[in-house]
Image: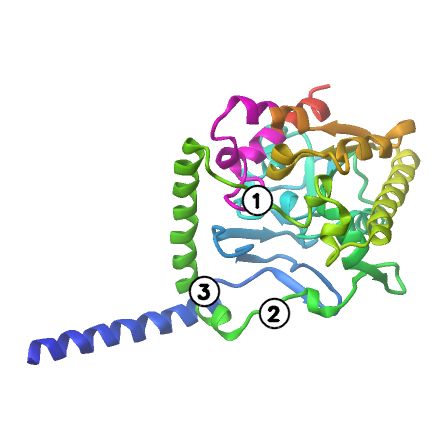
């Protein structure tokens, strides 16, 4: 009986110690580099922190420079030639260490340039134009800019970034878009990270098993679903008017970026890539490739279309989904970033 009591006390002390350690870890060690303002967000400057996009994603290190841009541990800024890179969470590198992202791969393998990665989750062409104009005013001139455009930009332009301040800085439609951490998520990140680690790896294992049996079903998304679903089926997020308004805003902002590229004489590349669901369900309702091609007509931009190579990978590789995308998610994993980096490198840096 006495021994049993000691065991219970030891277990209780272990959990108390663990939870105290978790609170310290969550609030001091595992700090975030995200900086939230009213109706806007960006990264903190000169920050070292950790980031997890969502449950099931690995926690990754985030370092930022004096501009508040994500960098790698070996990033330097001492070259005369510069590349500006614009995009959203894919380009930010959600769930990936910096040198696993396509920006980090460029930095390692095409080392004659300095790279400025302006990407953040749910940033879209309105933000890209704002940041480009901001840095041109600072006298930082790129030789090339690479804008990674994806399906979610339509929703972001029509429903998210709908306001502007007196300096033409894009603002969110409302504060509710920014989700605040509750007390459990804020103070018990170590526990949550362990649970998410188990969840992430079990998902990967299930995907490997299911893909071999050909019974794995892709999760569909609002962001990419309009390529194979009627807008009426997505009415909680789009109306026909808001959908085409989002497309128009994308075209307008890219035209403005193109104007600046000609004025300041830098190369402007537009990159498109598929979500996993696009490769499976197609583009019968709205063809993103044709839309992107129409944007770059009349030398507005140089289009890099990664769809055919991703489609080829799907045909030739039975495990294409788990090799290129995070399980049950729209984001590219390490394999997908490597594939896209190779495509862009060939088009942008090999000439």
Q: Which mark is residue 72?
A: 1
Residue 72: name its quadrant: top right
Task: State the extent of the magenta-drawn residues as a range.
Answer: 312-340
Q: Counting residues from the N terminus, which is met first, the one under dot 1 or under dot 2? A: 1
Residue hosting label 3: 189
Residue 80 appears in the figure: no
Tell me, what colour scheme is on the image? rainbow
Which of pointers 3 and 1 lies earlier in the amino acid sequence?
A: 1
Which circle marks residue 180 in the picture? 2
Q: Position of residue 14 (x, y in %)?
A: 26, 71
Marks 3 and 1 sit apart, C-alpha to C-alpha, by 24 Å
Q: Secondary structure at mark 1?
A: loop
- Up/down of 331 relative to 2, above or below: above
Q: Secondary structure at mark 3?
A: helix
Q: Is residue 41 above or below residue 214?
A: below
Label 3 Cα crowd, 10 Å radius (few <14 / some 14-19 / many 20+): some
Asked whether the beta carbons under mark 1 and mark 2 sit within 8 Å of each other, the answer is no
Q: Position of residue 40 (x, y in %)?
A: 74, 63
Q: Are marks 3 and 1 in contact (CB under 8 Å)?
A: no
Taking depth in this image into account, of 193 and 210 the one nearest to the observer is 210
Q: Secondary structure at mark 2?
A: loop
Q: Is residue 167 left or right of residue 175?
A: right
Residue 314 is drawn in which quadrant?
A: top right
């Amino acid at each position: 009986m006495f021994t049993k009591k000691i065991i219970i006390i030891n277990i209780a002390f272990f959990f108390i110690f663990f939870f105290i350690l978790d609170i310290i870890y969550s609030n001091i060690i595992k700090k975030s580099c995200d900086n939230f303002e009213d109706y806007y967000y960006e990264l903190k400057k000169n920050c070292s922190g950790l980031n997890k996009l969502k449950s099931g994603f690995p926690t990754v290190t985030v370092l930022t420079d004096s501009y508040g841009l994500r960098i790698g541990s070996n990033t330097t800024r001492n070259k005369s030639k510069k590349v500006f890179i614009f995009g959203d969470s894919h380009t930010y590198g959600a769930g990936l260490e910096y040198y696993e992202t396509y920006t980090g791969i460029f930095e390692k393998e095409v080392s004659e340039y300095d790279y400025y990665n302006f990407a953040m989750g749910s940033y879209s062409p309105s933000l890209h134009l704002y940041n480009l104009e901001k840095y041109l005013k600072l006298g930082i001139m790129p030789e090339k800019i690479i804008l990674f455009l994806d399906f979610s930009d339509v929703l972001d332009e029509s429903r998210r970034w709908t306001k502007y301040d007196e300096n033409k800085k894009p603002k969110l439609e409302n504060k509710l878009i920014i989700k605040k951490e509750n007390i459990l998520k804020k103070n018990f990140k170590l526990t949550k990270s362990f649970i998410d680690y188990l969840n992430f790896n079990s998902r990967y294992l299930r995907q490997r098993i299911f893909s071999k049996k050909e019974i794995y079903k892709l999760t569909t998304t609002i962001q990419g679903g309009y390529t194979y679903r009627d807008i009426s089926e997505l009415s909680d997020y789009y109306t026909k008017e808001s959908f085409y308004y989002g497309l128009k805003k994308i075209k307008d902002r890219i035209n403005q970026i193109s104007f600046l590229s000609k004025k300041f004489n830098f190369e402007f590349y537009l990159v498109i890539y598929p979500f996993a669901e696009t490769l499976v369900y197609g583009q019968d309702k709205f063809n993103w490739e044709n839309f992107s091609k129409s944007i770059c007509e009349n030398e507005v931009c140089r289009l890099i279309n990664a769809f055919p190579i991703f489609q080829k990978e799907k045909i030739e590789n039975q495990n294409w989904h788990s090799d290129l995308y995070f399980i049950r998610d729209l984001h590219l994993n390490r394999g997908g970033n490597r594939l896209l980096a190779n495509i862009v490198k060939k088009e942008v840096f090999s000439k």
